[in-house]
Image (cartoon, rainbow, N blue to C red):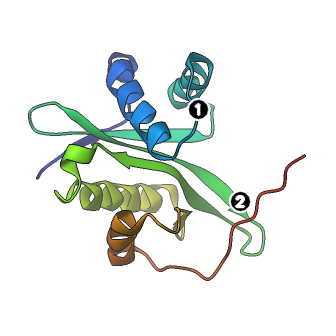
Amino acid sequence: MTLTITVPQDADRADWERLYRGYAEYYGMPMDATILDTVWGWLQASDAPLQGLLARTDAGEAIGLMHFRAMPSPLRGATIGFLDDLFLAPAHRGSGAVDEMLDELREEARRQGWPFVRWITREHNYRARGVYDRHATRTDWLTYQLEP
């Protein structure tokens, strides 16, 4: 499969929203208009730290999205990349589309000068982890979340 991977534009809002709702549903996260408007605003603002890409098939169908950002790494004295969200429509899983999307993220990291991109996923996300294992090195870091 050959994809066209671009920065989402105003005309892409409905396709992006459909995919982002699917992503939230997969992770069991609530989604509403306020969240959608906020995230879309971040993606459209030239000064916001969040960046995004939208993947389309040759037929123009939007099938995947990625959200990522620069993240300071104090121990390295460098900025790295952080992949917040990666979602592929279920009908296209196993098609190689995620490989193309991660290759595009690798190129974006080169353009940004990031030495690497880091991300997290759920332990039981075995199918995605199989793809991630082909593209990246699994670290031994555990994730914690502190509630205020």
Where does label 1 land, which residue? 30
Which residue type does callout 1 highlight? Answer: Pro
- Label 1 to label 2, Cα distance in Å? 29 Å
Q: Residue at x 46, y 38 (%)?
A: 25
Residue at 84% x, 55% y is 146
Label 2 crowd (10 A; few <14 / some 14-19 / many >=20) = few
Of tags 1 and 2, the one toward the viewer is 1
In the displayed structure, 14 sits above or below 144; it is above
Q: Badge 2 is on which residue?
A: 72
Can you say whether 140 is above or below 131 in the image? below
Q: Is residue 103 above or below residue 4?
A: below
Mark 2 belongs to which amino acid?
Answer: Pro
Residue 29 placed where, x, y %?
Answer: 57, 39
User: Residue 47: where, in percent of width, then height?
Assistant: 62, 31
Which residue is rendered at x = 43% and y = 34% of the image? 20
In terms of image quadrants, where is residue 15?
A: top left
